[in-house]
Amino acid sequence: MLQPSDLETVRESYDRVADAYVELAMGRLEPEPWLRAVLAAFAESVRGLGPVLDVGCGPGTVTAHLTGLGLDASGVDLSPRMVEHARRQYPDLRFSVASATELDLAPASLGGVLGWWSLFNLPREALPGVLAAFAEALVPGGQALVGTHVGEGDIARTEGYGGLPVSWTTHLYRPEELTGMLVDAGLEVVADLRLPAQPPSLRPQVLLAARRPA
């Protein structure tokens, strides 16, 4: 069973690098036309179905982008410091501190939910339960959008953004592995975008959109 202490070091690490993350403009969407295209398609698909929750929102970049696309989007993040940055940069939006493993989402309460490169630090045994909670929280026709690093095994990180010390593990997933988890959660994958290795991660990426059947 996942214990709160399992993610405490991850929280502390992201608090430590949050300022550098923002200063380095990490996660910017301006140079990422394919990612913007996916977010536009996601927004078109779930618009009018209900609110959208950006889980692991960091400093709020994607949450704000989705709001600009006409969605009622809010964000949560494990790191209080990241949430501080999100609230400062986007004071009109809603952000709160929460773990992906303890969201307590009401059934059929969301039109969309995102794990935008924010779930790979979760212990492997926790991810299926998180995706199942996402699925249960979606209305019929609602979608989950999940992006992550592709590969085999785990990478223990000791240095993060700006060269600051961190302690977290990046769990790599094969696209078909993540697809299987989404299907097991009761969703149907409707889009699968593969991105080749490129800075800053230097690893291939995958972005999956999965819909709750009507």
Image (cartoon, rainbow, N blue to C red):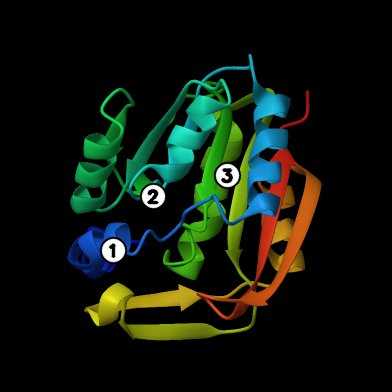
Asked if the residue at tag 2 contacts the one at tag 1, i.e. Cβ–Cβ closer than 8 Å, the answer is yes
The tag earlier along the polypeptide, 3 or 1, is: 1
As drawn, 147 above or below 36: below
Disc 1, SS:
helix
Q: Please give the label number shown on residue 58.
A: none
Which residue corresponds to the image point at 70% horizontal and 52% vertical from the top-left? 34
Disc 2, SS:
helix
Q: What number of labels is visible?
A: 3
Taking the image as shown, residue 18 lies to the left or right of residue 43, namely left
Residue type of the residue flagged with mark 3: Ala
Q: Please give the label number shown on residue 132.
A: 3
Q: Quadrant of residue 104?
A: top left
Which residue corresponds to the image point at 52% horizontal and 49% vertical from the top-left? 115
Residue type of the residue flagged with mark 1: Leu
Name the residue nearer the viewer: 19 or 189.
19
Q: Is residue 3 visible?
A: no
Which residue corresponds to the image point at 56% horizontal and 48% vertical from the top-left? 131
Where does residue 38 sit, x and y in percent of width and height? 69, 44
Q: Please give the label number shown on residue 101.
A: 2
Residue reaching furthest to the front: 31
Q: Which residue is mark 1?
A: 7
Name the residue nearer the viewer: 129 or 40.
40
Residue reaching furthest to the top: 48
Which residue corresponds to the image point at 42% horizontal and 64% vertical from the top-left? 122
Where does residue 60 sit, x and y in percent of width and height? 37, 42
